[in-house]
Image (cartoon, rainbow, N blue to C red):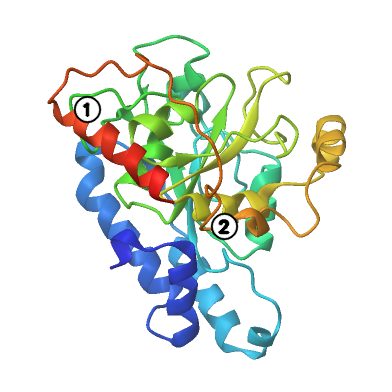
């Protein structure tokens, strides 16, 4: 089912002819049309997304198929609305103040995504100005409205990368990008039950991303699975002359061969994991307590 598809299974579908990028993009556009009026995860969709998908399909079917094609080739990516794109999309950080403004160039991470053949699906909702100016919090912006947790509509979805996490959880995009200064990837990823990676500052370029502070700002993936998040991370890390000082220092620590090599199914085998007593203080017999103990049991079995 496409709803649960991973990057790896999407590429299998592309390669065996059972799925095209155009079909995948159309599927997500339909999901956004159906669910976004309730969840407010997406601020706007890219009118060129289907054209980009068709180009990816054509590349795959032409002589270029013999060239190395990365994991994100033809895969739709949803970007937080503070990540600049030089295209038909706005970059507003959720604010009407920047509506209609034109950026000079794609953000550094977007350039890497485009080189990898990814399809820019649209812009995700967020805390307006990444909650640098406090409003109602929890994923509200003037342009996008109030984001809602797809699992419990009355629960906070957290912020500020709210729309990215909601979209990943509700299968409105294959993968998404968020940004973090202080909890803005980790909190919405956690509360929407998806996977977020907050990279070391400078591991990903901040060029073309509406800033808060160069000491803490970073850009990272929010996806349904750890493997998908790592695929995205491998694509967007690296040196950028427009964020030279930070990315030059951090790029020294990017492992040769990328991060996918560290994805191992038996990675927890032999590890000791501490469980602080009382940290999760669920009443005995509650659903929360049962689920918590089931997860601990699953980790022990690995």
Rendered image quadrant of residue 181: top right
| Residue drawn where x is 50% and y is 83% of the image | 15
x%, y% of residue 222?
Answer: 48, 42
x%, y% of residue 172?
Answer: 33, 51
Residue 105 seen: no
Structural crowding at the residue carrying mark 2, measured as other residues with C-alpha within 10 Å and reported as few (<14), some (14–19) or many (≥20): few
Secondary-structure class at tag 1: helix
Rendered image quadrant of residue 82: top right
Placement of 120 over or under 82, stated as above or below: below
User: Foreground residue, 225 or 83?
Assistant: 225
In the image, which disc is placed on residue 289?
1
Image quarter where the N terminus lies is bottom left
x%, y% of residue 202?
Answer: 75, 33
Residue 163 seen: yes
| Residue drawn where x is 29% and y is 51% of the image | 32
Structural crowding at the residue carrying mark 1, measured as other residues with C-alpha within 10 Å and reported as few (<14), some (14–19) or many (≥20): some
Residue that protrudes farthest toward the bottom in the picture = 63
Q: Disc 1 versus disc 2: distance between alpha carbons?
A: 28 Å
Placement of 114 over or under 100, stated as above or below: below
Left/right of residue 259 with respect to residue 131 in the rendered view: right
Residue that protrudes farthest toward the left in the picture = 285
x%, y% of residue 120?
Answer: 52, 55
| Residue drawn where x is 51% and y is 35% of the image | 100
Left/right of residue 75 with respect to residue 277 in the rendered view: right
Left/right of residue 51 with respect to residue 165 in the rendered view: right
| Residue drawn where x is 72% and y is 38% of the image | 205
Secondary-structure class at tag 2: loop
List the residue tagged with mark 2: 264
Residue that protrudes farthest toward the top in the picture = 134
In the image, which disc is placed on residue 65?
none
């Amino acid at each position: 089912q496409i709803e649960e598809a991973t990057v790896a299974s999407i590429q299998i579908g592309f390669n065996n002819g059972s799925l095209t990028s155009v079909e995948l993009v159309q599927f997500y556009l339909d999901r956004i049309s159906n669910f976004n009026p309730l969840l407010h995860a997406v601020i706007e969709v890219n009118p060129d997304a289907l054209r980009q998908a068709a180009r990816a399909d054509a590349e795959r079917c032409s002589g270029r198929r013999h060239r190395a094609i990365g994991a994100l080739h033809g895969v739709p990516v949803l970007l937080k609305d503070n990540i600049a794109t030089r295209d038909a999309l706005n970059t507003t950080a959720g604010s009407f103040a920047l509506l209609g403004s034109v950026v000079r160039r794609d953000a550094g991470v977007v350039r890497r995504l485009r080189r990898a053949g990814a399809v820019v699906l649209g812009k995700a909702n967020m805390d307006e100005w990444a909650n640098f100016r406090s409003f109602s919090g929890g994923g509200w912006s003037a342009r996008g409205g109030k984001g809602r947790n797809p699992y419990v509509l009355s629960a906070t979805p957290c912020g500020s990368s709210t729309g990215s996490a909601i979209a990943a959880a509700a299968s409105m995009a294959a993968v998404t990008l968020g940004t973090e200064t202080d909890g803005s990837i980790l909190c919405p990823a956690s509360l929407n039950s998806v996977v977020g990676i907050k990279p070391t500052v400078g591991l990903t370029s901040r060029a073309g991303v509406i800033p808060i502070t160069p000491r803490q700002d970073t850009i990272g993936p929010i996806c349904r699975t750890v493997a998908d998040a790592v695929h995205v991370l491998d694509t967007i890390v690296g040196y950028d002359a427009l964020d030279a000082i930070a990315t030059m220092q951090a790029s020294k620590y990017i492992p040769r061969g990328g991060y996918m090599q560290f994805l191992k199914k038996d990675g927890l085998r032999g590890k000791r994991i501490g469980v602080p007593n009382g940290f999760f203080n669920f009443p005995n017999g509650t659903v929360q307590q049962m689920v918590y103990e089931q997860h601990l049991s699953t980790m022990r079995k690995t």
